[in-house]
Image: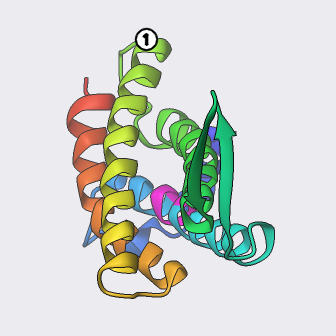
Amino acid sequence: MGKLIRQALDLFYPLFARFFDKQTYYYAACGGSNLVSSWLFFYLFFQFVFEKRIFNIEFAANTYVVSAYTLSSMLCFAIAFTLGFLLNKYVVFTDSKLMGRVQLFRYAVSAGFSWLGNYLLLKIMIETFAFYPSIANVFSSVFVVFLSYLLQKKYTFKH
């Protein structure tokens, strides 16, 4: 499947060759599609699954108040984590010599930092600056993309 995705991306690479080396192009294409799908999922979860509500979740004799945007963000993270790891491993960073379980652990660490940064920016934009959650999600994730790329290239899938 990774080879098939690379072949499809290679059809359009000549349009971007003067801007990106091939690996960066693959990362941008795979990461961009993962990001846009994450935005779509966030919107659908926030609007229709959690219906913009506040939830009281009881756990271990405690009640936690959790917003719809927090739950949406958590679900989107799980989906984007899985899809992102598979795309990075089998399409973007195919020349990495690290074992798969090492890559997965490192990806989890870097994805966790990226999610935390995204969530903190999301929370600040929504609660401090009154952004609409779906719009705040787009802005915060665009900012975090750059951090994520550096973490993936220099840490997770380094040679």
User: Does residue 14 lie above or below 99 as drawn?
Assistant: below
Quadrant location of residue 156?
Answer: top left
Determine whether, in the image, residue 157 is placed left or right of residue 91: left
User: Does residue 22 lie above or below 90 as drawn?
Assistant: below
What residue do we see at 74% from left, 67% from top?
Answer: 50
Quadrant location of residue 122?
Answer: bottom left
Between 55 and 16, the residue placed more toward the observer is 55
> Does residue 55 show up?
yes
Residue marked by disc 1: 99
Q: Main secondary structure of the magenta part?
A: helix
> Does residue 157 show up?
no
What residue do we see at 42% from left, 79% from top?
Answer: 136
User: Does residue 36 lie above or below 112 as drawn?
Assistant: below
Q: Amino acid at mark 1?
A: Met
Q: Residue 48 in the image: x percent, y percent?
A: 79, 75
What colouring style does the render use? rainbow
Q: Secondary structure at mark 1?
A: loop
Quadrant location of residue 82?
Answer: top right
Q: Which residues are magenta?
A: 30-34
Between 139 and 13, the residue placed more toward the observer is 139
